[in-house]
């Protein structure tokens, strides 16, 4: 993977691990190539070089795997061992935009009501709100631990709220109707905003037609957050092994034998928490049930005083628009602008210059007043799309295998909270609320071999629509 600071005209040709093609993730990395990891060298967890016996073997040391391990150990006294192909947070947990928002999946509130009914939708939204509160409380734990241990670092929690912008006039009324419904039925304190409200109080210089502001959302440095959680998990008594990719799994006499390059783990139960980074052919229980899609991010050099004045962005604000292929952005504490969107279709092409250039063009089209922008860093990562647009936490008791996957690119808060729910699903299922997330397994994609051709067609269609809108609207 690529890890250097580049201007937009520098050729970037590194390839990225591809879960639909490669047998296993790379095992040499100790941190992601994202901006977040530039100034912090992580604690290195040891490679598995022996045989370990445990109750639950957890594959994946990202948000979900670490959270599940911590709660299994803390709350239920379960002996569990975490196995990571690289080091904690090298996957999605150290590459995302750091948006802590209520929600997951790709279903709108109206789609949820249509599919699950009003009562269940309201309960699902409460679960989303709990996930944000959960992360907030977890960061408070980290702050307390930081005062006692120099090994835990500040994850730069920034409270600025989340703004969802209508990128077309017709979406304004839809957003406002949605927030009024949520205020009435979910106790939501989000605020509908006019075009003038946004221009005056939140953000200038962007083409928008109104939107909705969610004040309780906040942002973090996602890499430092996962480093803190890994340390909390280790402090709880969980063994974490890094740079130990799974080579094979054998199940015999109700025991899973997870074989790595230099060692093995024997466990009664297997928990899969690698989400979009799960090799498609390694675990039959997840094969063709998620579609890994690339999301890419650029970070600019610090904006000048004139650029900041032109942007006039509320401190800490996170922004996303209503496009089918969304752009998302935020101003970082050191006045750099982070800007993200969809990237290449395959890992082999993830770092080709045209995908970096496409994001730069997206930034300039979104914020046309920002001239002479200099790009400091560009990186990519995988998100897991589910067939029916919402994730699952599932326990196959016959196979003694649990998993959580399919966050659809909106998973920071929910994926951490999912770890707590996975622990309950295993040890205390009667405590689980009656929600769709954990009632059925992920559905298989029909004609799974056509996922990428279909994605290529979708990207081409949206590119044509945007070109027509720019030139003829």
Image: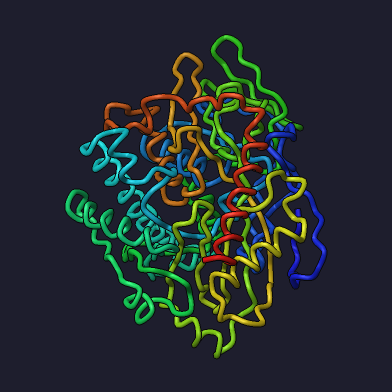
Q: Residue furthest top?
A: 253
| Residue that sits furthest to the left in the current view | 184
Q: What percent of the width, then of the height, locates residue 129? A: 31, 51
Residue at image point 79% right, 70% down: 9
Residue furthest to the front = 472
**Apparent side of residue 283 relative to residue 147 in the rendered image (left or right):** right
Q: Position of residue 341 (x, y in %)?
A: 58, 57
Q: Quadrant of residue 283?
A: top right
Up/down of 423 relative to 258, above or below: below
Residue 265 pos. (x, y %):
63, 27
Q: Is residue 457 above or below residue 465?
A: above
Residue drawn 68% across the image and 40% down it: 85
Q: How is the image coloured?
A: rainbow
Q: How many marks do you count on the picture? A: 0
Query: Residue, x 66% and y 54% (percent of image)?
Result: 380
In this view of the protein, which residue sits in the foreground, 63 or 127? 127
* Residue 111 percent location from the top left of the image: 34, 40
Which is nearer the eye, 94 or 121? Answer: 121
Q: Is 444 or 322 nearer to us in this picture?
A: 322
Q: Nearer the viewer, residue 114 or 441?
A: 114
Position of residue 344 in the picture relative to residue 268 (left or right): right
């Amino acid at each position: 993977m690529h890890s250097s600071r580049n201007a937009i005209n520098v050729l970037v040709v590194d390839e990225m691990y591809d879960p639909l093609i490669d047998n296993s993730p790379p095992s040499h990395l100790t941190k992601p190539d994202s901006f977040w990891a530039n100034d912090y060298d992580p604690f290195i967890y040891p490679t598995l070089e022996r045989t370990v016996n445990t109750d639950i073997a957890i594959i994946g040391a990202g948000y979900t795997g670490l959270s599940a391990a911590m709660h299994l150990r803390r709350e239920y006294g379960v002996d569990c061992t975490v196995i990571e192909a690289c080091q904690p947070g090298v996957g999605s947990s150290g590459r995302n935009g750091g948006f802590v928002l209520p929600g997951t999946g790709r279903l709108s509130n109206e789609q949820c009501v249509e599919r699950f009914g009003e009562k269940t939708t309201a309960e699902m939204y409460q679960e989303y709100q709990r996930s944000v509160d959960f992360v907030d409380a977890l960061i408070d734990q980290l702050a307390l631990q930081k005062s006692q241990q120099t090994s835990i670092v500040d994850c730069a929690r920034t409270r600025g709220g989340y703004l969802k912008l209508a990128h077309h006039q017709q979406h304004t009324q839809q957003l406002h109707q949605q927030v009024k419904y949520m205020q009435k039925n979910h106790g939501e304190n989000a605020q509908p905003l006019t075009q003038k409200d946004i221009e005056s109080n939140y953000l200038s210089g962007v083409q928008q037609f109104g939107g909705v502001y969610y004040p309780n959302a906040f942002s973090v440095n996602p890499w430092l957050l996962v480093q803190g959680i890994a340390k909390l998990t280790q402090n709880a008594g969980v063994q974490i092994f890094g740079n130990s990719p799974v080579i094979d799994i054998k199940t015999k006499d109700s025991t899973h034998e997870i074989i790595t390059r230099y060692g093995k783990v024997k466990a009664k139960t297997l928990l899969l928490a690698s989400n979009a980074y799960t090799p498609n052919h390694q675990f039959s229980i997840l094969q063709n049930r998620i579609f890994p899609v690339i999301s890419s991010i650029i970070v600019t050099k610090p904006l000048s005083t004139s650029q900041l004045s032109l942007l006039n962005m509320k401190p800490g604000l996170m922004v996303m628009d209503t496009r089918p292929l969304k752009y998302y952005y935020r101003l970082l504490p050191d006045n750099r602008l982070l800007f993200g969107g969809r990237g290449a279709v395959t890992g082999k092409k993830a770092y080709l210059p045209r995908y970096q250039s496409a994001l730069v063009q997206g930034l300039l089209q979104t914020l046309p007043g920002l001239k002479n922008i200099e790009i400091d860093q560009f990186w990519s990562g995988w998100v897991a799309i589910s067939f029916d647009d919402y994730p699952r936490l599932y326990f196959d008791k016959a196979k003694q295998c649990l998993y959580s996957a399919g966050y659809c690119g909106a998973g920071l808060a929910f994926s951490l909270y999912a770890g707590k729910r996975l622990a309950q699903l295993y040890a205390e299922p009667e405590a689980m609320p009656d929600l769709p997330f954990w009632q059925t397994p992920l559905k298989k994609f029909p004609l799974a071999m056509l996922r990428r051709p279909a994605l290529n067609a979708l990207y081409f269609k949206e590119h044509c629509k945007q070109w027509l809108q720019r030139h003829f609207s």
